[in-house]
Amino acid sequence: MIPVSEPYLGKEELENVVQCVKTGWISSQGAFVRQFEDEFASYVGVRYGVATSSGTTALHLALVALGIKGGDEVIVPTLTFVATANVVAYTGATPVFIDSNPQYWCIEPERIEKAITPKTKVIIPVHLYGHPADMEAIMGIALKYGLHIIEDAAEAHGAKYKGRMIGSLSTISCFSFYANKIITTGEGGMCLTNNKSLAEKMRLLRDHGMNPTRRYWHNCIGFNYRMTNLQAAVGVAQLHKIDGIIKIRSEIAKRYNAKLDNLGITLPPKEDWAEPINWIYTILSSNKEGIIDALTKNGVDTRPMFYPIHILPPYQSDNKYPVAEGLSSKGFSLPSSPSLTNKDIDYICGVIGENSLSTS
């Protein structure tokens, strides 16, 4: 089976992990954690990094640091991984769902403003499948109404919006380093911000609310959201090769695009103002189920596009979000790992070509 995604690991990661084991620094108290925070923040062009145990905990930490609580509303796209809504629910606030833009699949800015109420506190745009949301429009709305923006950049390490790095365009941005992401720590995440007081608050909250200068004195109710030194050791090595990983993934996307063009397939979006990264190569087809079935039978793994959150049992709503529903019904992802060969891609596209029975 050709997997949809697998980590791209080498001797550098192993050497760093061995160093942790030999020195005994394997928990969250270790030099690699701060090194990873500092280097990743520098890579994105932001002053402070706060490493966490996952992308989900990063999002939750960001909301808590901003004081989001019961009675508040947080705007999120309905077409995203469920964690984006779950973290809002963790705080007691209400996620307010917004439909997608049909061209680039991210949250539709024109619909955001219509959903704002006196209870709205935060907008969480998601850079879906590595394509940036329209941040200029979203930033304008946030400024007009005095709202915070939390970028969910879990899928967009290294992507750019009008020449600016994704993750540098908000109050706080949140990344995931799960095993299928552009760079990985196995599990893990990070919050980035230019606000020193927010960074300090997030550091406090991720470590049980323990006073950094008075051990076992807890200023507030916090969480155990720390990243281990072992994870950060892998992250440092991964970050040092991120540009190469992105380049390989870009070449994979180009080959897919060339092979799948004119097969009745809608290719991944690419707006003029965006420099997306090929996190996981995602396409649309009216014959989605037939193609997935054929690929599975021929040893190729796939994954469906996310279900819109508003149709999931915890958030089920009678409201209609036709763009997101339409995208989800046709969307699925193909293998996108850096280890994928041209032969693999040609094989995958050959199977798709034989089974593209209807137009997208």
Image (cartoon, rainbow, N blue to C red):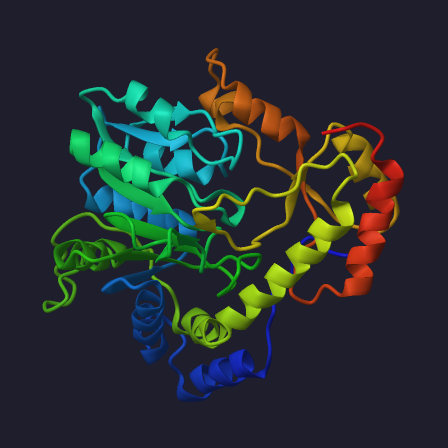
Q: Nearer the viewer, residue 173 or 244?
A: 244
| Residue at left offset 45%, top offset 86% | 19
| Residue 16 drawn at (x, y percent) | 47, 82
Residue 208 in view (yes/no): yes
Q: Nearer the viewer, residue 68 or 8?
A: 8
| Residue 120 drawn at (x, y percent) | 23, 26
Vertical position of residue 279 compared to residue 215: above or below? above
| 318 horizontally vs 285: left or right | left
Vertical position of residue 269 compared to residue 164: above or below? above
Q: Residue furthest top?
A: 318
Vertical position of residue 137 compared to residue 209: above or below? above
Answer with the quarter of the image where residue 7 lies.
bottom right
Answer with the quarter of the image where residue 338 lies.
bottom right
Q: Nearer the viewer, residue 136 or 19?
A: 136
| 214 horizontally vs 23: left or right | left
| 26 horizontally vs 255: left or right | left
Query: Looking at the rendering, in which quadrant would you find the C terminus?
Result: top right
